[in-house]
Structures are given as structure tokens and as C-alpha cells.
Amino acid sequence: MGIEVEKKAGFDTESAKEVVKELRASFVAGKTKTYEWRRTQLTAMLKMMDENEPQIVAALTDDLSKPELESSIYEIAMLKNSCKLALKEMKHWMMPKKAKTSLTSFPSSAEIVSDPLGVVLIISAWNYPFLLSLDPVVGAIAAGNAIVLKPSEISPSTASLLAKLVKKYLDCSCIKVVEGAVPETTALLEQKWDKIMYTGNGRIARIVMAAAAKHLTPVVLELGGKSPVIVDSGINLQVATRRIIAGKWGCNNGQACISPDYIITTKDYALELVDSFKCELERFYGKNPLESKDLSRIVNSNHFARLLKLLDEDKVSSKIVYGGERDETNLKIAPTILLDVPQDSLIMNEEIFGPLLPIIMIDKVEDSFDLINYSGAKPLAAYLFTNNKKLKEKFVEKVSAGGLVVNDTTVHLAEPSLPFGGVGESGMGAYHGKFSFDTFSHKKAVLYRSFAGDAAVRYPPYTAGKLRL
Ligand code: NAD
């Protein structure tokens, strides 16, 4: 097999039109719809990972200095799990599901058929550039679609490796990678798609959605936001602190969509929490975290400058209680804790997406729910650490977020039985596991009748007697 890789240079509206035309021809010919095709592609994707793990890790090191363990587990192993689950369950997912019928259509039977949507566009982000590119592709393949993948230009080594690997391992007449930035993505967005899945920030999501609206194309938007962590007192503080660290600095140095963005705790507990962070952070990353090999770098100088702008605002920099060091040459910022940051600061009004962690103090832990709900945008994730059963119940009842986790952070992402997606400004639509298959399928309603039971009541003349029936 082989695939064409659409090269950056010269990829314009005409090229995009050609790509879609070719893929649509493959789709209409039924190539992607068979179980066999779907199985072959997913098996080839697994083989691709088995045979190229060192190259994938190297590309992620190049783009982000991502620690090898994070690349192996959070990018490669997670994608393998997605492939394996789809291979195991796909036959079952594809089977029409019987539906109950009522007296209205008696006698009849009905089923819901999962129909592939057609030709879909997947636009992905730079922070988990391997997983976020191919995980949606797994769902789109499982559901029987033809696919264009547009990886992020901000992680160019992974983007070009993806193009090469997809070319080598997958079916080029049905799956294509287009490398490029704004002009190439704009050319793609001008085309008519059957679904667009976009992962990235809310500003570009608005551009994607506006382009999709022109063709009435449905969209899945996987966005971000400020994911809060509520920390109650009387908990196992060491475990809580370690789990917050793992979700923040252990996830691409905070450059993850569901990384803890800020902490809310009570005034009485804040200092104990800060001490615990100091102790565990030093244990994990040493006395000079800028030299730690276990922390990703900031992706580029633009994001480095953006983070320093948040950190160096006067009313914020005076609140640093741990960290704050930076190394501009290597684009590194140390894990940084800020205590009692004002609500009107820049850092509290945009997604941080980096290694800075502000702590907000309140009088009573119950007040945190209103703080989150009135803060504006609904977060992609919200976390609570507590032993209090009532508080857990209130958290689930009151907080609107894409997903919630009690007594841990970020791990819901790895649970394929849960839908992964946002709500409000953190996104729309969801994927992972069966939800990925459903996201790229149309649930086609099919009703079967025979010629029996032809009730005269539905036919004219509409007599008064028929009305009384
Ligand atoms: P990015 O800069 O890589 O952009 C994402 C994609 O948008 C890229 O493929 C890029 O080429 C494309 N793009 C950029 N400008 C465009 C334009 N003008 N028109 C069309 N396409 C354009 O990534 P980013 O936005 O910096 O990613 C970080 C954001 O993504 C954060 O907000 C984060 O929370 C969110 N995110 C969400 C998830 C999720 O699963 N919900 C995952 C990762 C990141």
C-alpha cells in the first residue's frame, strides 16, 4: 500500500478540491465501508507503531523535548489501546441495533444502522501531536469514512513523520495527510466535508465552525479552558499533591488541555498544600527543575513569551511561592506555584497551558462551586479532592464541565467507556472508545413493514367516524 502525502508547498484550493474529489470517489465506491477494510487499516496502524516507536519518540523529543516515558505511555500506548479496542469491538459496533416499534406502525420492525458519514477532515493540535492526530482517525476508520488529517505545523517533526508513516502503512486512496499551516487549512476548510473534527483553541474553532456552516457540515470541537482543582482539607495530602503534579507538570509540563489550570482551597489549608507541593516537586524534579529531563520544554518562543507575560504581571509575580525560574535559550520554565492571585489578573482570565499553577483561597470549600460556575466559560475538566461524600455529590450536581474526576486529575482521558469532550466554550461533541465510532457515524433509522395491517384510517376521505377512532 502507499499514500500520497500532500506537500506543504503549493497546496491551494485546487489541490484541496482534488484531494476531496479522490477521497469521495473511494468512499462512494464503497472501499471504506467494508469490515475488512476497516480491520486492515487499524491492524496496519498498530504495526506502524510497533515498527516505528523510536522514530515517534524522537519526533516528539524534537518538537517538545517530551520525556520518553510520557511519549510512550500518553501518545503511543494510548493510541494502541484505541486501535485494539476498535478491532475487538468494531464488528459489534457496526451491527444494526434492533429498535422497538409501537402501535403506530404495527405490524413492523425497526433497526438503527450506523452509517459512515463520508469524507471527514481532522485538524489536530501540537501538544499531543501523535495521539491527537491519530486517535480521531481510529474512530473515523472504525466508522468507515475516508479521511484527511491535517496535523499542527507547530509540531513539524511529528507532522512530517505522520505524513511519512501514514503514506507507508495506510490506504492512500482513502486516507491522506495534508501538512501545512493557515493557508493549507483554509484551503481545506473551503471544501465540503461530511464532518470536521478540530482540536485546538476557541479562537480558531470559531473560524472552523464558520467555514463548516457554509456547507452545513457538523463539527466536533475539542477545545480547552481553565480546568480547576478543588482541594478540601482532611485528605491524604501527599497522594493528592502527587496526583495534581502528575496531571500538571507530568502532562507535557502543563501543556495539556485537561491539566489543572488553578487550585481552589480554603485559607486554612492553603499553606499546608503549598508545603506539600514544595516537598513533592523537589522530590520529582530536583533542586534545579530547569535541568530536569522529566519536564517538556515550552513548545516555542511565542508560547514562552505568552507564559512570561502571565507570570510577570506585577500583581502576579509578587505571589510566587515556589519556582518562577526560566531559561529562555532552552524554552524552559520551572514548575511555579502562586498563592492568592487576584481574580482580575491575566493569569486568572485565560487558559494557562503551561507550568504555572495559581492557588485561589476561599473561606469555605463549598464556595468553590459558585466560583467555577460564575467564572464565565465552562471548563473542559474539573477536579475535586475530598473524603466528604456530600461534597462529592454537590460537585457532580453543581459543576458543569466536560468531565469530572474525584480524587485524581486527568485520568478520565484514559477511560474509553467515558466520552471525552467539552461543554460550552470547552467544546462540543465527544470521542474515545465507542463514542469515537458514534461521532463519525450517522444513526440511520430504518423501519420495515409488510403489506399487512393496512389501516384505512390514514386514508381520505377523513370522515367524522375516523376522527373518533
Ligand atoms: P495549534 O496552534 O496547533 O492549532 C490547532 C490547529 O488549528 C492546527 O492544525 C493549526 O494549523 C490550525 N489553525 C491554526 N490557525 C488556523 C486558521 N487561521 N484557520 C484554520 N486552522 C488554523 O493548537 P492550539 O490551538 O495552540 O492548541 C492549544 C489549545 O487546544 C488549547 O486551548 C488546548 O486546551 C486545546 N486542546 C484541546 C484538546 C482537547 O482534546 N479538548 C487537546 C489538545 C489541545
Image (cartoon, rainbow, N blue to C red):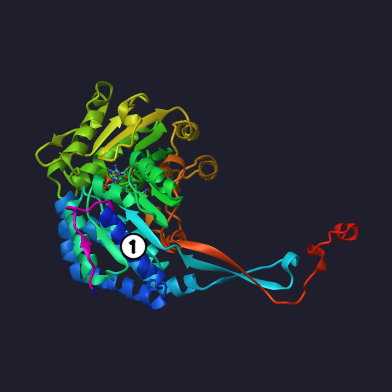
What x and y, as percent, mark residue 367? 49, 31
Give above or below for 328 relative to 95. Answer: above
Q: Position of residue 165 (x, y in %)?
A: 21, 66
> Residue at 49% of width from left, 41% of height from top?
400
The residue shown at (22%, 26%) is 312
Q: Is residue 108 visible to the viewer in this orientation of the structure?
A: yes
Q: Main secondary structure of the magenta part?
A: loop
Q: So how many labels did they put on this image?
A: 1
| Quadrant placement of the C terminus | bottom right
| Quadrant holding the N terminus | bottom left
Pick the residue in front: 191 or 255. Answer: 191
Q: Element type at marker 1?
A: helix
Residue that protrudes farthest toward the left in the picture: 329
Is label 1 within 8 A of ligand 1 (CB to nearest ligand atom)?
no
Q: Nearer the viewer, residue 205 or 245?
A: 205
Q: Is residue 112 above or below residue 320?
A: below
Closer to the camera, 379 or 276? 379
The residue under the point 29% across, 61% down is: 19
Give the amino acid type for the residue marked by disc 1 in the picture. Lys
Give the quarter of the image for residue 107. bottom right
**Left or right relative to 434: residue 246:** left
Q: Which residue is mark 1?
A: 21
**Which residue range is magenta in the image?**
2-13
Neighbor class of circle 1 (other Cα within 10 Å; few <14, some 14-19, many 20+) is some
Which residue is nearer to you in this view: 248 or 19?
19
